[in-house]
Image (cartoon, rainbow, N blue to C red):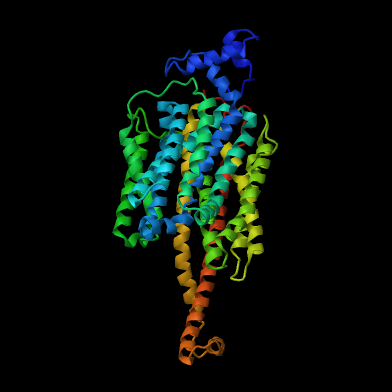
């Protein structure tokens, strides 16, 4: 369907070039209302409608995907205000964020099964509706338990807005348009986490935190109308047979426990906490058991098809997506904290500093889509990936050498280079990942791609947060070893600070104590700056170590299934 000219389906269906739009519409309606499993085997009317209105469907799916990714970061800046209104501690209110990511990660690998079981259109429409309703009830929540419950529901509904939406675009657009289409889709996914904190801060400051959720309602309704009006299910029969309940259970417990460990580990001092130790063991055991169960020949309907990982292009792409998630979400986590706690940026200034980088991502992604579009790509995707990795490493090197005196101009250029690099990474890696997949494997591959990106981000935030904390202590001890009471430079600095404080009305004794406190604060600030520098350089090293995976990829073959029809 996706690679045929617009009139091909009408010619087959009617055997006549004069087959009219009215007749085609009636036929599509009859097929759509006939129920699952009752469509004529050779029917293409539903396919024609999806391809005829595919750009409107793209608008609806991009809108839904942006809404879903935005909700991973938009409420972060509102959590303190939210906790105060709901009477929750910082630890308790963090579950508003944790619950959403937990359920999202658990459902992502199951999206292929759910789409096959209930139909692509039904599953997508239901997921968007669930996301809208849960967003509304999040905004009207009056207790912590209520909002956490609806956030869990919201995360489960949001899983399809990424993987199923992306797989649908692979199916309804022809191969020569996949470059530009995937670029448009990925621009939203990449930019949304960057813009989330800025939008969340604006809504919280100028309205209330509830609007971080209410804003999803009109956006979601537009997306739902576009999808339900123009998207049609394929002619592929719905999946029948038994449900892999054991696989679902192992998946939910394994990934849920892993995500909890990554979210709460740093706060609970990692393996000093008995809960973290138990959940780590449970996660490892369940995930290993799940892999064996899903690959066992006796399991006729596995919830996750791990056999597609025999495809080395897909496996290499998943490896690269872990690094991308690590760099994308890890960088978004690091920079706002560093800029506001060390450089003194306001939340608005932080958002405006990040904005040009997001715009550069849009520019490079669209450019990349044009280079990779058409029946034959103009550039080998691997070259674009290497270029993107090189630029990303350059930006991390720049961010890894900031000082306490750095300002907005010093950070903006590095963030723009970083944003430009991301556009050259996501689009070609996506195309390479899908290029050798069979049409029936596209949905499963999409779920795994989005899962690895999300897990990469969770690993990035957990590892980098702990690393910054430990490195700050390390650098503070090193700096402190050079400061001692008999050092003339130390005494001169303390006396200078004390004299200034006495001039402002403090007693000599109080001024001396405050001078020691200020010196300690200066040392701590310098140590923290060095630790953030180390963290940015760690991201650089992570990308360097994953670079060899690029050479496992092969350029898409002419006529490959990258954009082929999956109906």
Q: Residue at x 48, y 48 (%)?
A: 211
Residue 302 is situated, as x and y percent measured from the top left of the image, at 37, 32
Between 235 and 161, the one lying in front of the other is: 161
Q: Residue at x 42, y 36 (%)?
A: 130
Query: In the orientation shown, which residue stands out farthest toward the right?
Result: 378
Quadrant, the N terminus = top right
Residue 447 is left or right of residue 565, and the answer is: left
Between 124 and 489, the one lying in front of the other is: 124
Between 137 and 108, the one lying in front of the other is: 137
Q: Residue at x 36, y 28 (%)?
A: 301
Residue 450 is situated, as x and y percent measured from the top left of the image, at 49, 41
Q: Residue at x 56, y 53 (%)?
A: 543
Residue 385 is situated, as x and y percent measured from the top left of the image, at 62, 45
Residue 155, quarter of picture: top left
Relative height, residue 506 to residue 310 (above, below): below
Residue 114 is left or right of residue 179, and the answer is: left
Numbered circles on residues, count: 0
Residue 93 is situated, as x and y percent measured from the top left of the image, at 38, 55
């Amino acid at each position: 369907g996706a690679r045929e000219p617009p009139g091909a389906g009408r010619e087959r269906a009617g055997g006549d070039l004069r087959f009219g739009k009215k007749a085609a519409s009636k036929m599509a309606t009859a097929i759509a209302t006939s129920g699952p499993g009752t469509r004529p085997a050779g029917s293409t009317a539903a396919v024609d409608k999806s391809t005829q209105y595919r750009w409107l469907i793209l608008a609806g799916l991009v809108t839904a995907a942006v809404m879903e990714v935005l909700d991973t970061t938009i409420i972060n800046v509102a959590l303190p205000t939210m906790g105060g209104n709901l009477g929750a501690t910082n630890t308790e209110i963090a579950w508003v964020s944790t619950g959403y990511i937990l359920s999202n990660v658990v459902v992502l690998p199951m999206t292929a099964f759910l789409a096959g079981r209930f139909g692509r259109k039904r599953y997508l429409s239901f997921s968007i509706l669930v996301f809208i309703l849960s967003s509304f009830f999040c905004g009207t929540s009056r207790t912590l338990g209520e909002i956490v419950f609806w956030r869990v529901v919201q995360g489960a509904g949001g899983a399809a807005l990424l993987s199923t939406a992306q797989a649908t675009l692979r199916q309804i657009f022809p191969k020569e348009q996949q470059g530009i289409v995937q670029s448009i889709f990925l621009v939203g996914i990449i930019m949304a986490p960057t813009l989330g904190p800025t939008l969340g801060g604006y809504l919280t400051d100028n309205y209330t935190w509830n609007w971080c959720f209410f804003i999803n309602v009109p956006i979601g309704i537009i997306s739902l109308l576009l999808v339900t009006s123009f998207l049609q299910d394929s002619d592929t029969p719905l999946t029948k047979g038994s449900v892999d309940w054991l696989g679902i259970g192992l998946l939910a417990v394994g990934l849920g426990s892993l995500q909890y460990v990554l979210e709460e580990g740093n706060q609970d001092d990692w393996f000093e906490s008995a809960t973290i130790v138990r959940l780590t063991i449970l996660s490892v055991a369940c995930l290993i058991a799940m892999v064996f169960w899903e690959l066992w020949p006796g399991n006729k309907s596995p919830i996750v098809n791990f056999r597609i990982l025999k495809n080395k292009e897909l496996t290499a792409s998943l490896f690269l997506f872990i690094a991308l998630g690590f760099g994308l979400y890890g960088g978004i986590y690091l920079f706002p904290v560093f800029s506001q706690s060390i450089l003194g940026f306001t939340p608005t200034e932080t958002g405006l500093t990040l904005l040009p980088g997001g715009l550069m991502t849009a520019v490079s992604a669209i450019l990349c889509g044009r280079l990779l579009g058409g029946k034959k790509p103009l550039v080998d995707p691997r070259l674009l990936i290497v270029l993107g990795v090189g630029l990303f490493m350059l930006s991390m090197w720049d961010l890894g050498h900031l000082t306490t005196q750095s300002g907005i101009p010093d950070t903006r250029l590095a963030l723009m280079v970083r944003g430009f690099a991301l556009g050259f990474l996501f689009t070609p890696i996506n195309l390479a990942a899908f290029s050798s997949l069979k049409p029936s494997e596209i949905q499963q591959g999409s779920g795994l791609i989005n899962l690895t990106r999300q897990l990469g981000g969770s690993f990035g935030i957990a590892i980098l947060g702990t690393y910054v904390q430990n490195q700050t202590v390390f650098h503070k001890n090193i700096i402190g070893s050079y400061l001692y009471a008999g050092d003339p430079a130390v005494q001169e600095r303390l006396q200078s600070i004390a004299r200034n404080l006495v001039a402002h009305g403090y007693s000599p004794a109080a001024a001396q104590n405050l001078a020691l406190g200020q010196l300690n604060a200066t040392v701590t600030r310098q140590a923290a700056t060095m630790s953030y520098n180390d963290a940015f350089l760690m991201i650089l090293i992570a990308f360097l170590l994953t670079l060899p995976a690029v050479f496992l990829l092969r350029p898409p073959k002419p006529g490959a299934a990258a954009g082929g029809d999956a109906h």
